[in-house]
Image (tube, rainbow, N blue to C red):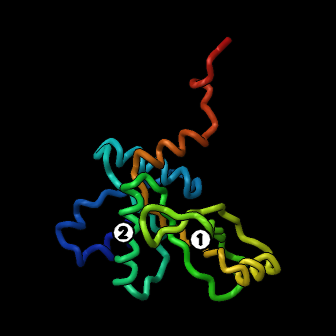
Amino acid sequence: MAQDIRFHLEPFGELAKKIRFIKEPIGRNTAPAIGLAAIYLKDISPESLMAVMPSDHAIPDADAYLMDLRLAIQGALKDYLVTFGIKPTHPETGYGYIKVDKASKVETEGLLKVDRFVEKPDLQTARSYLSDGGYYWNSGIFVWKTSKILSEIQKTSPRSPSDVERN
């Protein structure tokens, strides 16, 4: 896998040689991989920003994507956990959905507040999401401060046995 990625990075020349890979010994889904990468990044640069992007996405309009990425960075610098939603074109049961809070306003124009994430719905539910208009497909693309995502992971993770006080 790393060899395939290195092949695609060759056009970046010397810059590509600075890229480091973190390989999971066993696949554990996205959240643990994000946590591991965040720990690594925080050790290198405590004030770093982190972008998470699936490797299998096709991005047909690179300029629009870069504009959206700049907007996401602005939000991340304000401590938002930014996710990219894709406006659905049809009811899809193979994707997760992001429900936005239509009434909320955030400081950075162009960003919407997420109300909740919904895992892959059945067809009837997907149709209702499409007609509602307040739902986006979850792209799996995220931008945030490394310190912020580590804080959120810590808040929602079960405590390890060593963290539990003994009575």
The spot of residue 9 in percent (x, y) is: 29, 73
Residue that badge 2 annotates: 3
**Dot 1: few (<14), some (14–19), or many (≥20) neighbours within 10 Å?**
many
Which image quarter: residue 155? top right
Tell me the residue at 34%/70% (across/down).
70
Of the numbered discs 1 and 2, the one sitting upstream in the chain is 2
Q: Quadrant of the N terminus?
A: bottom left
Q: CA distance from mark 1 to mark 2?
A: 28 Å
Tell me the residue at 53%/45% (across/down).
152
Amino acid type, mark 1:
Asn
Image vertical order of residue 72 relative to residue 87, above or below: above
The spot of residue 24 in percent (x, y) is: 48, 53
**Dot 2: few (<14), some (14–19), or many (≥20) neighbours within 10 Å?**
few
Image vertical order of residue 131 relative to residue 46, above or below: below
Left or right of 68 in this view: 166: right
The spot of residue 108 in percent (x, y) is: 42, 65
Question: Which label lies toward us, 1 or 2?
Answer: 1
Tell me the residue at 55%/78% (across/down).
86
Tell me the residue at 32%/70% (across/down).
6
The spot of residue 46 in percent (x, y) is: 32, 43
Q: Nearer the viewer, residue 103 or 92?
A: 103
| The disc label shown at residue 138, or none | 1
Image vertical order of residue 13 relative to residue 76, above or below: below
Amino acid type, mark 2:
Gln
